[in-house]
Amino acid sequence: MSLNTKVSLIVSLTVLIGLPVIFLVVSLVTNEWRFLTFSIIPSFFAGFTGLIFALQQRKKDRITN
């Protein structure tokens, strides 16, 4: 797996998991749950799209090597 594929996989997983966790903490501290509800769908779309492309590139790298 190339360095770019590793970086894109890490970034997409961070967006998919990390951002909702950050907004969960913000929601717990402020007791305003709209932060969490408005962050889940955009982070899912961004993280899942990046994850799909990273896994496709990983598969292409595996086939060529």
Image: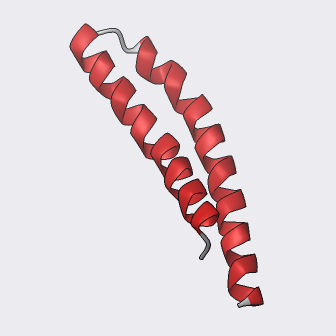
Residue 8 x/y as whole percent: 60, 55
In the rendered image, which quarter contains the N terminus?
bottom right
Residue 10 x/y as whole percent: 49, 55
Q: Is residue 25 left or right of residue 62?
A: left
Occupied quadrant, residue 33: top left
- Check the image and report above or below for 36 versus 10: above
Residue 45 x/y as whole percent: 65, 39
Relative to the observer, which residue lies in front, 33 or 42?
A: 42
Colouring mode (rainbow / by chain / secondary structure / one colour): secondary structure
Relative to the observer, which residue lies in front, 32 or 46?
A: 46
Q: Which residue is drawn at the image coordinates 51% and 25% (left, top)?
A: 39
Q: Which residue is drawn at the image coordinates 56% and 49% (left, top)?
A: 12
Occupied quadrant, residue 22: top left
In the rendered image, which quarter contains the C terminus?
bottom right
Q: Is residue 38 left or right of residue 63?
A: left
- Check the image and report above or below for 34 versus 18: above
